[in-house]
Image (cartoon, rainbow, N blue to C red):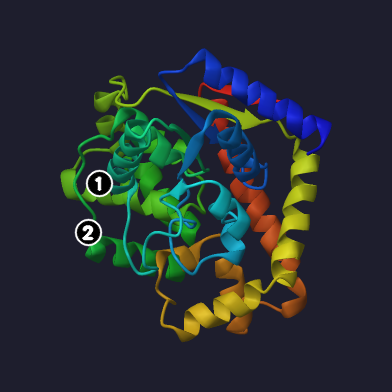
């Protein structure tokens, strides 16, 4: 372990010691080093890790999800990692229920739960619960996808801007899942998602968590993203996606995630092979930028 990594672990340890009754949540943009920090911290405090990653939770999505290595999984018990069939559906509310049970189980055995992941809506749902909006409508979601494919994602975002400008201002036009969900709520209830969320207020704390993230400037993070993508591609990422498609997992939600979607496009002849690495790096940087924006509005202790 480098001196800088050791320093980050010591800082995280101090946060854990300051809040013995709370939950340390290691968050941060993709490729910032969350998983390694979580494993190191768990070794210091007698901890177990509860995953908060919407791709790592699925079995068979291994190489390109940043899933902990076999050695890490053997040395430190992980919960909600490699747990669900690829075709299973999980949303923020369902994950939060599972995570709360896992945290309770870890504590009951005298161990220390450590939350780790970059799916921030899930973490927020665990902390505060969610507004009581209607469940999903597959019919509306399918309709939104048709609009996005026919007219572009910006057109779908423009529709949201007309009915819920507050939510539209918070969502990137390319964030198809969340834009569609916000439209869906309005279409089902006649009320904007932002109004539902304001009424909920996220004021009642269900799980007291202390968020920590590794400080990493944009240039350094880009270098880490590119190095990681190169390593994963060299380690069989394309073959993994081929295998997932052959096994009938083309419609799995995780197949739409960053990297997996681009490899599938390449395999389908929609992306030149020579453009694959650069495209993955570009979309990952966009994803990381959205994560950093979220963190700027959250109560986070920055390490390093």
**Residue for point 17% across, 44% down:** 189
Q: State how many labels appear.
A: 2
Q: Is residue 249 above or below residue 56?
A: below
Residue 144 x, y percent position in the rendering: 34, 62
Q: Is mark 1 on a helix, strand or loop?
A: helix
Q: In which quarter of the image is residue 126?
A: top left
The quarter of the image holding the C terminus is top right
Q: Is residue 246 above or below residue 8?
A: below
The quarter of the image holding the N terminus is top right
Return the residue nearer the eye: 66 or 254.
Answer: 66
**Residue for point 70% across, 28% down:** 8
Q: In which quarter of the image is residue 102?
A: top left
Residue lying at the far top of the rendered structure: 18
Q: Residue 243 carries which label?
A: none
Q: In this view, does 10 lie above or below 188?
A: above
Return the residue nearer the eye: 203 or 78.
Answer: 78
Task: Sort mark 2 into few (<14), some (14-19) or many (20+) by Cα contacts within 10 Å.
Answer: few
Return the residue nearer the eye: 191 or 290.
Answer: 290
Task: Sort mark 1 into few (<14), some (14-19) or many (20+) by Cα contacts within 10 Å.
Answer: many
Pointer 1 residue: 185
Residue 49 x, y percent position in the rendering: 48, 41
User: Closer to the N terminus: mark 1 or mark 2?
Assistant: 2
Residue 283 x, y percent position in the rendering: 64, 57
Pointer 2 residue: 137
Q: Is mark 2 on a helix, strand or loop?
A: loop
Residue lying at the far front of the rendered structure: 109
Can residue 249 be seen in this snapshot?
A: yes
Q: In which quarter of the image is residue 68?
A: bottom right
User: Could you tell me if the residues under marks 1 and 2 are in contact, i.e. CB atoms within 8 Å?
Assistant: no
Q: Distance between the residues labelled 1 and 2?
A: 9 Å
Can residue 270 be seen in this snapshot?
A: no
């Amino acid at each position: 372990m480098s001196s800088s990594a050791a320093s980050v672990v010591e800082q995280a340890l101090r946060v854990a010691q300051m809040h013995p009754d709370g939950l340390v949540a290691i968050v941060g943009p993709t490729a910032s080093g969350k998983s390694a920090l979580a494993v190191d911290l768990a070794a210091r405090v007698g901890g177990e890790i509860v995953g908060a990653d919407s791709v790592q939770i699925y079995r068979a999505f291994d190489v390109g999800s940043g899933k902990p290595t076999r050695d890490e999984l053997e040395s430190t018990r992980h919960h909600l990692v490699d747990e669900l069939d690829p075709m299973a559906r999980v949303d923020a509310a369902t994950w939060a229920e599972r995570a709360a049970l896992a945290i309770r189980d870890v504590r009951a055995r005298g161990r220390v739960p450590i939350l780790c992941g970059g799916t921030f809506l899930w973490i927020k749902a665990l902390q505060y619960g969610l507004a009581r909006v209607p469940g999903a409508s597959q019919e509306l979601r399918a309709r939104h996808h048709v609009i996005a494919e026919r007219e572009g994602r910006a057109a779908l975002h423009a529709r949201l801007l007309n009915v819920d400008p507050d939510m539209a201002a918070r969502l990137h036009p390319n964030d198809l899942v969340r834009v569609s969900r916000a439209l869906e709520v309005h279409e089902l209830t006649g009320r904007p998602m932002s109004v539902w969320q304001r009424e909920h207020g996220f004021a009642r704390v269900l799980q007291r968590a202390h968020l920590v993230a590794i400080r990493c400037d944009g240039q350094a993070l880009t270098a880490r993203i590119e190095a990681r993508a190169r390593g994963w591609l060299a380690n069989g990422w394309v073959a993994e996606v081929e295998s997932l498609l052959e096994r009938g997992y083309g419609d799995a939600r995780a197949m739409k995630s960053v990297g997996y979607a681009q490899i599938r496009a390449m395999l389908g002849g929609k992306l030149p092979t020579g453009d694959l690495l650069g495209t993955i790096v570009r979309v990952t940087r966009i994803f990381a930028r959205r994560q950093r924006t979220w963190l700027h509005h959250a109560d986070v202790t920055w390490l390093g």
